[in-house]
Image (spheres, rainbow, N blue to C red):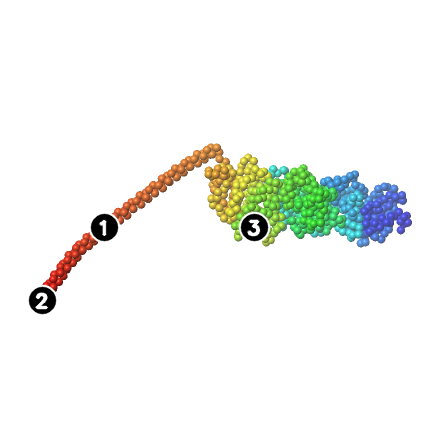
Amino acid sequence: MNKKLYNVMNWPEIEGIVYADCKNPMNMLGSHLIKEGNLIQIYRPDAVSVSIKVDTKTYELEKVDESGFFACLVPSRKKKLDYLVTLEDVKGKTITFKDAYSFDLKPKNDEFKNFFAGHEYDANKIFGSKEISIDGVSGTLFTIWAPQVSRVSVVGDFNKWNGKIHQMEEIDDRGIYRLFIPGVCKGDKYLYELKVRGEKEYYKIDPYATEFTKGKENYSVVGSPLKKTAKKLKTKQTTSPRIYELNLLEWSKKSGIKTYAKLAEDIANYLSKLGFDYVNLMPVAEYFNEDTYGYTTIGMFAPTKRFGNPDDFVEFIDILHSKNIGVIIDFNCAYFGTDTRGLHNFNKTNLYGGLSPILEKNETWNVYTYDYYNNCVLSFLYSSFNYWISNFGIDGIRIDSLASMLYLDYGKEPGSWIPNMYGGNENLAAIEFIKNLNKMAAKENVITIAEESSGWIGITKDFDGDNLGFDYVLNKNWTNDYLEFMEQDPLFRKGLYDNLILPMVYNYNERFIQKFSADDLYGTGVSLYALAAGNDAVKKKSDVRLALAYLYLYPGAKMITFGQELGLDLTNPALKWDASDEDIAFIKDLNHFITSNSEVFDQDTKEDGFRWVEDCNSEETILGFARIGKNGQTLTAVFNFTPVERVKYRLHVLEAGKYSMIFNTNEEKYGGDEKLTKEIFKSDKNDENPKELDYIDIDIPGLSMLVFSCEKYTEREIEENRILKEAAVAKKNAEDKVKVAKELATKAKEEAIAALEAQKRAEEAARLALEAKNEAQKKADDAVREAIRIDEETKVLLEELKNKVFKKDTKKATRK
């Protein structure tokens, strides 16, 4: 070895490079001006020989270490030497490139100030991979935050995944590493290779990557700036949005569509036809584990590659916006998964977070909550949120498992968590993060939705105290109560009647979204159809329509998950999901009904916009309420939750007027057996109880909902009704009198007839008695005559006997 070269080499530092255990390789590698000239040092374990070209002169580098460390002295006093490297590898292949260690990587003043302060909203512009040009040389600038490691390298096809070749420079002693690699460009896949002292090297994806490889390879991809950003949607003028929840992967499977653009066209056409305001996309940020439905997000800045690249996702949003469909995405800032190459154990410590909750969504998921006390993690999450909003024009976000953020002990064993500074279990840093996120959203006119199940008070209230400032919170308790009620045999639903009544007690404490979401249904392996009552499809679909109608008429925004609108048993894997016009007629009309009666449903968050009219009939399981608009217009809805038709049911109503049926879930066009009646139902009042509401008498089909609009009586009609009612009362009184008179006349006639009959019977009896008397008299006379005859005969006989005895005695006397 050249002695002069040997004497200027820093062998201990070279050893750090060779063993890839160096934080500042640029102290050694590249060009360094020393008194002997320019020292050029290049470490390429894949090289047999290395030379450089300076201006027109070529210098062969000496291999000073067998591991692949090359060096030479160039007689130049230039502080920044411009040179080109030529390398020959073991296979004889020659490549020429600019040395990655010949570029200045010094950070800008205060470049990381906001990042470490916890309020950097564009950290993705600092970190990640950026295809740029430095001094006319094209390549990619890599920047990563990885404190407490001994070395970070960029690896990829461009260096045969050898972590010794592109060791990164620590440009900030708080753990920020950077390296510009010439020639690496858009589409190149890469990873970071990290080394912690005493541990084996390991790979991690780039937390700030905007693209990943498709499939299960789990590589970051060098992205490029978006060609354009998505157009913003005009503000929707509705306080009761209808939201359709779907999973893009599931939609792709059922439709056979594989690209963002085609998916957007299919979804936009479908939802426009149905009349939804928003689509809520279950996680679209990149994920590897499909068993978690995308909720263990791995790429917080990357739309999933499954359907295209980020520019394709911009087109996806624009297509939906062109159909006036707003886009809400699940923004998973509550937890991350344990994918080997993900955020978990990033630097062999809990850098991004380490508390492991047991999620209510799925107890088997192995996840960790973010560390909201770490300012750098906060900047990471704020920047992710800002990235989706500013680049993709997202109209709203839904935060899943909010409870796991709010509570330090959520789903954790005793002793596995540390109380806050006040001794409580509230995660104070997470609460502050949530508030700031909602403030950011409010400035951008982005709606925020919370999925929260712990009963936290003030989720949708403004930011005073513990209030969090969300626009909406999913009403999980309402859904649980209704589904428990629904799965009962209809004849036993009366036992859970209060499940429908009691949620109104707390309904106006928050701005709720009433929902049948994927979490409620597919997460538990059921569908509305599977829970519905009945032994055949007709009855089951009637019950599904009833459930959807109850959801829609109940106060609050609405959300249903994909497929439920069709009334199909989507738990059946063999079922073909094909939505015909007949299938979607019901949900289409239901959405149109809400839109056409917006002055009523805009009162969703107002207590005076709702009133029960029937909430005490558990025996027949009938429920009724009125929805009241700002202008006083009312709609009265009545629900029959049993298959038994209720005939001439007396339904109370709030207003005196003429009632028209304007919606019937049992119509023929929906699969029922009725037509919408044009009959006018005039309300009446029970005069015996003047405090009681007016009423109409109606027939309610089984498992159905009816809605009635009211045309209030005019003053003239009220007067006419009064006159008619008085006339009716007078007529009734007269009719009652006539009825009484008729009854009396009838009674008198009956009595007269009875008397005549009695007289006839008496006369007959008298006749018979007279005849009997005459007969008796005759018999008496005959008896007298017979007695006289007998007496006379007796006298004769006695006289004869006397004479006979006398003669005998005389004869005796004579003989004597």
Residue drawn at point x = 83 percent, y = 43 percent: 82
Task: Specify which label sits upstream in the sequence, 3 or 2.
Answer: 3
Q: Is residue 214 visible?
A: no
Disc 1, disc 3: CB below 8 Å?
Answer: no
Residue 511 locus on image (x, y percent)? 61, 40
Report helix, strand or loop for mark 2.
helix
As drawn, which residue projects farthest toward the front? 816
Give amino acid for label 2.
Arg
In terms of sequence position, does the residue under pointer 1 or pointer 3 come before the other?
3
Going by the numbered disc 3, the residue's amino acid type is Glu
Q: Which residue is mark 3?
A: 487
Q: Is residue 687 left or right of residue 328?
A: left
Question: To which residue does mark 2 refer?
Answer: 815
What is the spatial separation of the Cα atoms under label 1 and label 3, in whole angstroms? Answer: 88 Å
Name the outermost residue toward the left. 814
Label ID, residue 773: 1
Task: Compare marks 1 and 2 and give the one earlier in the sequence.
Answer: 1
- Which residue appears at 72% of the width and 46% of the height? 418
At label 2, counting other C-alpha atoms closer than 10 Å, the crowd grade (few under 14, some 14-19, many 20 or more) is: few
Residue 117 occupies quadrant: top right
The residues tagged by marks 3 and 2 sit, at their Cα atoms, a distance apart of 137 Å
